[in-house]
Amino acid sequence: MSDPSEPESVARAVERLRLAEASLSRRRQSDCGPSETARAAMRVVYDSADVGKRVTPTDIAASLGISTPTATTMLKRLHDGGLVAFERNPDDGRSKYVVPTDRNADVEGVDPLTQRVRDIARGLDDDMAAKLTLLLDAIADAVDEECR
């Protein structure tokens, strides 16, 4: 491990994290936790709920670039696992909204690492947590903008 006081060490640590995430993604393709697509769907559901937006299976499919039937099947599995709920769309009886269940009730079901990351983060003081959050958000934005 490099000296954490060196600015280059941040880039190396992020690259190590990216490689670990890629490796985890490959391992998850063989039934080691929720698939990357299911995790992405949960992120859409959570992020939408956080800003007060309601989403349908069609919205989720479009956001993930998958077919609506594929999204519907995946959402049914998430529903059966108690991770999402469906609410009737009052404006369109043929449509339903996908909403998160209590996101803290079964964090292991959404992503087995969630509780471990929360436990690690509890060890940070408020100032460090704020700085780290800003850094990680900026990195996530850079990743999202790549190859668009």
Image (cartoon, rainbow, N blue to C red):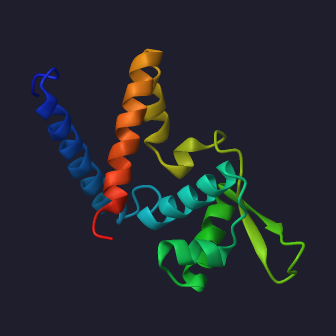
Say which residue appears at 28% left-offset and 69% top-offset: 147
- From the image, which quarter does the N terminus lie in? top left
Asked whether 90 or 22 is in front, the reply is 90
Q: Is residue 92 left or right of residue 120?
A: right
Q: Is residue 70 left or right of residue 147?
A: right
List the single residue furthest toward the top. 125
Q: Residue 129: where, in percent of width, then height?
A: 43, 24
Image height check: is 52 above or below 94? above
Image height check: is 75 above or below 132? below
- From the image, which quarter does the C terminus lie in? bottom left
Q: Give residue 7's quadrant in the image.
A: top left
Count every numbered label the image shows and give the total: 0
Image height check: is 10 above or below 108? above
Say which residue appears at 62% left-offset and 69% top-offset: 75
Asked whether 51 or 101 is in front, the reply is 51
Image height check: is 110 above or below 86? above
Residue 105 in sight in this render: yes
